[in-house]
Image (cartoon, rainbow, N blue to C red):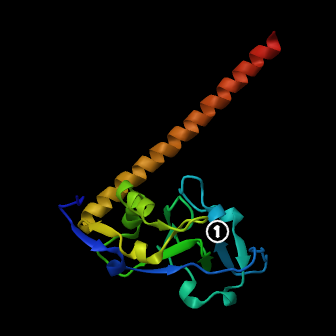
Amino acid sequence: MRLYTHYDMTFLKDIAFTFTGHTIRFKVENNPGGDCVVIQAKDISERFAGIDANALNKIFVAEVPPHQQLNKDDILLLSKGTKNRAILYSGSHQYAVATSAFTIIRLKSTHLLPGYLAWYLNSKPAQDYFNANRAGTTTLNLLKQAIDQLEVPVPPVQLQEKMLNLINTTQQYRYLLEEYTHHVHLLTETILQKQIKQQ
C-alpha cells in the first residue's frame, strides 16, 4: 500500500545526487593546523539533533577530492550499522568532509527543501524501508542503490515550509522540556542530600 497518495512520489535518485563520504584508511588524527573538519559517526549527537562542533578533528582540505567536500544543506545519512538516520549539514565550516560511514545526499531539485527531505529520511516510512534493505552479515550497510530507490513524497513547497515550522517548534519544545526535567532532577537531588545531612 502506498502512503502519501495525495502527493507525487519520486525516487530519491531523480531529485538528488548520492555519493559515499571520504574514505580515510587509518584512524583520523587531528591536525590543529588543518583547514578542513572531518565529520565522523561519533560526532553526531545521540538523537541526531546536531553535530558536536567542538569534537571535530581537522585535516588539510588538499587531502579531500573536491567533489567530496560538503556543501551547505547537504544531508548526511549514516549508512553503516542499524541506525540509518539523517542530519542536515548547516555549512558552518568553510571546508568540511564526512567519512565513508555516511552517504551524502545533495539535492538537485528545487521542488524539495533540504530540511524536509532530512525529516522524511528520519520518518517511519523511510526508516522501515531502510530496515528492510540493509545488506551484510557482520557489518550491516545501506547500499547506495537501495538509497537511490527510496520513494519520497513531494508536497508543494509551501506545505513543506509549514511542516518545517512545526518540526522546529516541536524540537524547541522538546529541548525546553528536557532542560526543565534536568533542572527538576537536580533540585530534587539537592533537597534530598540536604535532608540526609540534617539527620
| Towards the viewer: 172 or 111 | 111
Picture quadrant where residue 183 is located: top right
Looking at the image, the residue that sits furthest to the front is 137
Q: How many marks?
A: 1
Whether residue 94 is visible here, answered yes or no, is no
| Towards the viewer: 8 or 177 | 8
| Towards the viewer: 69 or 41 | 41
Q: For this view, does 147 lie left or right of residue 186?
A: left
Picture quadrant where residue 2 is located: bottom left
Q: Quadrant of the N terminus?
A: bottom left
Looking at the image, the residue that sits furthest to the left is 6
Examine the rendered structure and indicate whether residue 16 appears above or below residue 117.
below
Q: For this view, does 96 lie left or right of residue 28?
A: left
Residue at x-position 70% and y-position 20%: 191
Whether residue 194 is visible here, answered yes or no, is yes
| Towards the viewer: 131 or 127 | 131
Examine the rendered structure and indicate whether residue 163 appears above or below residue 71.
above
The x and y percentages for residue 120 are 37, 61
Examine the rendered structure and indicate whether residue 128 appears above or below residue 91.
above
Residue at x-position 23% and y-position 59%: 4
Q: For this view, does 142 lie left or right of residue 14?
A: right
Graded by Cα atoms within 10 Å as few (under 14), some (14 to 19) or many (20 or more), the crowding at tag 1 reads many
Amino acid type at mark 1: Gln
The x and y percentages for residue 76 are 51, 70
The x and y percentages for residue 8 are 21, 69
Question: Helix, strand, or loop for circle 1?
Answer: loop
Residue at x-position 17% and y-position 61%: 6
The x and y percentages for residue 22 are 61, 81
Q: Circle 1 sits on which residue?
A: 40
Residue at x-position 67% and y-position 31%: 186
Q: Quadrant of the C terminus?
A: top right
